[in-house]
């Protein structure tokens, strides 16, 4: 028998063992990645945009699977565990944990959760603005945990067009609220068959006497270029000093810019 044929069985064993060792080390080196892959389905994933939660990951934080309680508003996730007396099982606001029920912050729909409760498209601009006040409350009160994939953030943690639209509308409401606060408001009275009269005195607005009287101007929130609307309604009237020429303050239709009193007839 040649030495080649006696070596062959050992060579075969050697190859099998060597392949086994290579396989073992390559699996061991991928261990963390494999672990990450399987855990990824259960735990939120950190990305450049912060930690991103899927709907099923969030559900784990409703106080049953995990002791932690996570609440979502406008797609932002907060750890409200320290507020267990409000959000724990059986408590008044338990419905809010484990998913996004943003709309309920305005409508008070607390009975049971449905996916539709994250939809705020039927709310008014002012109601959307209230939601931002709630979000500020959570920012100040509870630890922030990340973003929920859904209406407000995509799977990469980027803000959706829906989210931007909501923020724009809320900003519009804030602007309208602030409009006219720079100058004192006019006196206003309404008489049947005559309409609405607006006028300025040196005490109109806050009742505190000032050095100047001002002229009644309709306050138009910036970004509102609806001319027709401008001529029709009073909405908000401010007493503005003569020298102010700001597109936000317009003279009432049919009223001299220098008049201290204007009457706006009813439209019907
Ligand atoms: C749209 C309606 C409402 C919403 C969205 C709402 C939401 C909430 C939330 C989220 C909390 C917990 C805040 C925290 O984490 O500290 C809370 C607390 C509370 N709410 Fe409401 N609520 C609503 C209506 C009401 C009404 C009508 C009442 C009274 C009859 C009420 C009474 C309270 C009280 C007493 C607390 C606890 C305050 C404390 O112990 O610190 N809420 N509310």
Image (cartoon, grey):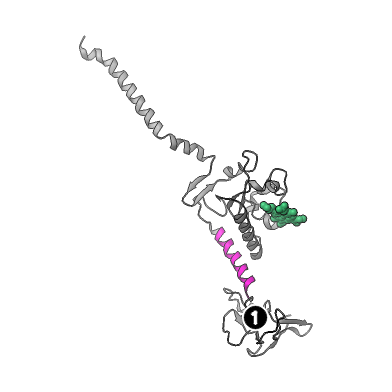
Q: Is residue 172 left or right of residue 18?
A: right
Relative to 237, does residue 85 appear above or below in the rendering? above
Depth check, front residue: 115 or 98: 98
Residue 105 belongs to magenta span: no
The residue positioned 29% from the left and 15% from the top of the image is 9
Mark 1: secondary structure: strand
Q: Quadrant of ligand 1?
A: bottom right
- The percent coordinates of residue 63 (x first, y second) are 65, 41
Q: Residue furthest top?
A: 1
Residue 32 visible within the image: yes
Residue 37's x, y, as percent?
47, 38
Q: Quadrant of residue 170?
A: bottom right
Q: Which residue is mark 1?
A: 218
Q: Is residue 97 visible?
A: no
Residue 58: image location, x then y, percent: 59, 45
In what quadrant of the picture does the C terminus appear?
Answer: bottom right
The residues colored magenta run 163-179
Is residue 164 covered in magenta? yes
Above or below, 118 against 193 in this view is: above
Secondary structure of the magenta portion, mostly? helix
Q: Check the image and name the residue furthest to the right.
A: 192
What is the number of callouts on the image? 1
Which one is in front, 201 or 96?
201
**Residue shown at 31%/22% (left/top)?**
15
Residue 198, above or below 93: below
Asked whether 167 or 195 is in front, the reply is 167
Q: Quadrant of the N terminus?
A: top left
Question: Residue, x 57% and y 62% (percent of image)?
Answer: 165
- The residue drawn where x is 66% and y is 90% is 259
Label 1, residues with CA under 10 Å away: few <14, some 14-19, many ≥20:
many
Residue 188 x %, y %: 73, 81
């Amino acid at each position: 028998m040649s030495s080649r044929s006696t070596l062959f069985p050992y060579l075969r064993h050697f190859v099998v063992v060597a392949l086994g060792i290579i396989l073992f080390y390559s699996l061991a080196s991928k261990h963390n990645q494999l672990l990450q892959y399987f855990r990824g389905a259960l735990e939120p994933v950190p990305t450049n945009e912060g930690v991103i939660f899927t709907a099923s990951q969030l559900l784990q934080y409703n106080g049953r699977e995990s002791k932690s309680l996570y609440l979502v508003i406008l797609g932002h996730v907060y750890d409200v565990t320290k507020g267990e007396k409000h959000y724990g099982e059986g408590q008044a606001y338990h419905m809010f944990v484990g998913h996004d029920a943003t709309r309920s912050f305005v409508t008070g729909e607390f009975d049971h959760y449905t996916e539709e409760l994250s939809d705020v498209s039927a709310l008014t601009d002012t109601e959307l603005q209230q939601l931002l006040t709630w979000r500020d409350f959570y920012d100040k009160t509870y630890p922030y945990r990340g973003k929920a994939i859904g209406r407000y953030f995509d799977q990469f943690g980027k803000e959706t067009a829906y989210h931007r639209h909501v923020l724009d509308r809320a900003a519009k409401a804030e602007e309208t609220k602030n409009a006219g606060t720079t100058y004192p408001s006019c006196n206003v009275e309404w008489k049947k068959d005559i309409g609405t009269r607006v006028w300025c005195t040196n005490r109109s607005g806050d009742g505190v006497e000032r050095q100047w009287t001002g002229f009644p101007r309709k306050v138009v929130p910036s970004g509102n270029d609806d001319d027709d609307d401008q001529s029709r309604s009073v909405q908000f009237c401010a007493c503005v000093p003569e020298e102010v020429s700001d597109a936000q303050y317009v003279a009432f239709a049919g009223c001299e810019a220098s008049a201290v009193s204007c009457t706006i007839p009813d439209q019907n």
